[in-house]
Amino acid sequence: MTGTSTNKFTSLFGFIASKLRTNPFSTIAVLLMITILAALVITRVGDIASRANASVDGVDISKALAVNTVTVSAETEYTTRQKIAGQVIAARESDHGFDRAGILAEVLVDEGDRVKKGDILAKLDMRLLDAREIEVKAGLERAEAMAVEAKATLERVATNFDRYVVLRENGHISQARFDQVKNELESAKAGEISAKSAVESAKAALAALIADRDLSVLRARFDGSVIARYRDEGEPFGMSGGPMVRLIEDGKLEIRVGLTELAAGALEVGDAYIFNQVGRDIETTLRSIVSKVDQNTRTVTAIFDVAEGADVLPGSLADMTIDVKVEGDGYWLPTEALAESRRGLWSAYTLSPVDGYDEYSTLARQELQLIYTEADRVFVRGTLQDGDHVVASGTHRLSQGFLVKAN
């Protein structure tokens, strides 16, 4: 240290000492402020030096953001999960009614009743049929008696004709007498034919009467339940009849659903499938797939048979989830990896390593088309390449060219 510098410090210390004697508190406050300012200057200088040391080739790696990444791989197909819904229906459901006119005499069932095939549901008034039956049976007996008489007459005339043939050959009777006997034979034959026809006519009338009696008793055509009753006792039926009750075959249920052609192709006839209804599982078997596209809904109908004993009611809804494979090139990404882009597209950020710094990368924007969405991931296609490292989340705080460090 030179003499001049020593003199300056001696003068400074002398000045400070004199101030401390005259105004100690103010002097101490000024000294503290000087000390703090000196410390801040020293820290700033160190920080600048540190940043200078962290900058290489113009890249300030101290500002690199930490990001989570995923490595994408190219796919040639993806699987979609589709929920399909259908209505539980009875295998058969139809109106039961009379096919003839009459007065409703008795109804034996009501809504909610279960019936077996062949059970009587209702009856028409049969008093006219009873009277007609007596008349038809009497006519049949009369026709049968006349047929017996005609047969006996024919046999007698035929025997007499045989004798006259011999007499005519021997010349004992005239030709006129022979022709008369021959005519009697033909008349007897015609009489027998007429008598037989009368018998057949009477039998046909009796058969029609029996059919009318059968049609006057309404029977269930299958096992099921009565879901509607349209008429009560005393109501008339016209010549065309009409519905009386409605039955459903609730012991044999099915579920019909409309599927896309792609979804229908993922199902196998004869396989078992599980439907869900308010938390309950419904076991079914795929019976058939209708080989025609509905022109209104553009869907294919699939019919599932519900297992016997299932606790499910006709008319209710049930749904099922199926996996459908779709051919198409693309990549799976986390949903949070997407950022909204222009013209309906989406984007994601891939990492491009910085030369000489394996841990650090810059971001490049990739334009993507959204193909399929799931709860937490998406299937996309675009400018990605197989094996690219993609930022998995936090894209809202990023931009192209940002310096990042992958976790």
Image (cartoon, helix red, strand yellow):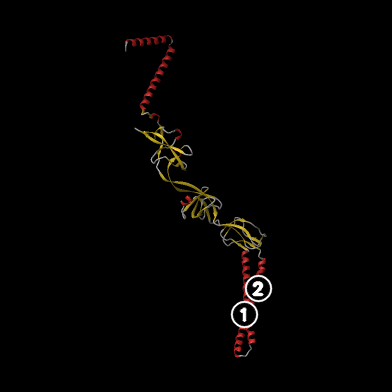
Q: Is residue 75 visible?
A: yes
Instruction: Kindly identify the amino acid type of the residue bearing the numbered disc 2.
Output: Gly
- The image position of residue 126, as x and y in percent, is 66, 65
Instruction: Label 1, secondary structure: give it.
Output: helix
- Point out the image quarter for the N terminus: top left
Crowd band around label 1 with a 10 angstrom C-alpha radius: few (<14), some (14–19), many (20+): some
- The image position of residue 101, as x and y in percent, is 65, 63
- Point out the image quarter for the C terminus: top left
Tell me: 6 left or right of 276: left
Q: Which of pointers 2 and 1 lies earlier in the amino acid sequence?
A: 2
- Residue at 37% x, 34% y: name it: 353
Where is 295 relative to 184, above or below? above
Res 395 → quadrant? top left
- Residue at 45% x, 33% y: name it: 397
Tag of residue 139:
2
- The image position of residue 398, as x and y in percent, is 44, 33
- Residue at 62% x, 83% y: name it: 182
Crowd band around label 2 with a 10 angstrom C-alpha radius: few (<14), some (14–19), many (20+): some
Instruction: Label 2, secondary structure: give it.
Output: helix
- The image position of residue 245, as x and y in percent, is 61, 58
Where is 324 relative to 199, above or below? above
Q: Is residue 303 visible?
A: no
Q: CA distance from mark 2 to mark 1?
A: 22 Å
Residue position for label 1: 189
The label nearer to you, 2 versus 1, is 1
Res 229 → quadrant? bottom right
Tell me: 44 left or right of 200: left
Instruction: Kindly identify the amino acid type of the residue bearing the numbered disc 1.
Output: Lys
Please name whichever residue, 46 or 329, is drawn nearer the observer in this view of the structure: 329
